[in-house]
Image: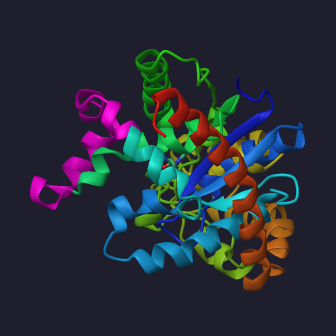
Amino acid sequence: MSDNKRILSGMRSTNPQLHIGNYEGALRNWVDLQNQGYDMFCMVADWHALTTMYENPHEVSVNAREVAKDYIAAGIDPAKSPVFIQSHIKEHAEFHLLLSMITPLGWLERTPTYKEKQQDLGSAEREPYGLLGYPVLQTVDILLYKPFGVPVGRDQAPHLEIGNDIAQRFNRLYNKDVFQPYKYMIPEDENRAKLPGLDMRKMSKSYDNGINISDTEDETAAKIKSAFTTPTKMRKTDPGIPEGCAVCQYLKIYSPNWEQQWEEDRNGERGCMQNKKELTEIINEYFRPMRERRAQLDDATIEDILRDGAKRAREVASATMDEVRSAMGIY
Ligand code: TRP
């Protein structure tokens, strides 16, 4: 039986700061769902971060606390929605081992995200075994909580698909309906979810082309100041091409008058500096309540929140593990 109102999602703690792309592409949706009355379980996937950051495990652990702060800053209320770190729930490790026995290798080798990462790494000698199992661990994260749905960005769809396939295979192999299929809850506003980086490439921490939830107002202003605009627009009177300008793309998402701003930009009636100034004000205003909330979270508070979140998560996860062992006849 899946609990009708429970949903679960997570992000890897590869970095100490989430950027506004993480917010628009996922976190915002989590907060909305929480506020609609879903029981939102918010996990920080520190073990997943180790698939690429195995040389810096302590950093991953430190980052995990910062990611949790960003969840709460964004509007996750830890009293309603358990916030927890994956590695604090040892059931994830046990179930991962069991599912790794029943997951066909071919399913994992075919995963598009795996192929990409594999190419980045270059040689099989450097490729950790854990990377191949990434979707198995993600499946564990989900199935242990038997959620109704999983809110994620579109890029995660292949992992969610494998998850439902593994669940089905488990049910079939052990002849018991332990798991029901869960839904993919992908944000409807694809424009918002696909916010480009300030240089118009994909927003990514590794390109350092995003604005972080935790940036100060001055940092935000400096980043927007050096953002990519229409290269041929040297003066205010030169025509702009808003479709290819990062600042205009952001205005489209955040500014209520973006249509007029685009029109003026296109007609050479407004300059890039003005766009940047207005965007900075809007973005800083938008993120101000989150930044203020974040500033109030000290380390001790976060540890308490995570301990409480882990306790609530563990209750669900250990009950599922009891069912899993029983279905498998392991005692
Ligand atoms: N793979 C996800 C990402 O990179 C993170 C993740 C780990 C996750 N476990 C999960 C997402 C479980 C949803 C559910 O964004």
Q: Quadrant of the N terminus?
A: top right
What residue do we see at 14% from left, 55% from top? 122
Image quarter for residue 112?
top left
Whether residue 57 is situated above or below residue 262 in the rendered picture = below
The tally of labels here is 0
Classify residue 5 by image quadrant: top right
| Lateral position of residue 183 relative to residue 59, left or right | right
Residue that appears at 49% across and 19% down: 171
Q: Position of residue 283 (x, y in %)?
A: 76, 62
State whether residue 213 appears in this view: no
Tell me, yes or no, whether the highlighted magenta stretch contains residue 107: yes
Q: Residue 53 is drawn in which quadrant? A: bottom left
Apparent side of residue 242 relative to residue 3 in the rendered image (left or right): left
Q: Residue at image x 60%, y 51%?
A: 10
Q: Where does residue 146 sit, x and y in percent of width and height?
A: 65, 33
- Is the residue 305 above or below the residue 158 in the image? below
Q: Which of the two residues, 83 or 27, is positioned nearer the viewer here?
A: 83
Q: Is residue 16 visible?
A: yes
Front-lying residue, 139 or 21: 139
Q: Whole-percent x and y of residue 293?
A: 84, 72
Q: Nearer the viewer, residue 32 or 143?
A: 143
Task: Pick whichever, 234 or 279, lies toward us.
Answer: 279
Q: Residue 199's x, y, as percent?
A: 47, 59
Way the structure is coloured: rainbow
Q: What residue appears at the point 82 percent right and 60 percent down from the top-left corner?
A: 78
Residue sitting farthest toward the front = 331
**Magenta part of the protein: which range?**
99-127
Question: Is 117 part of what is drawn in magenta?
Answer: yes
**Main secondary-structure element of the magenta-colored stretch:** helix
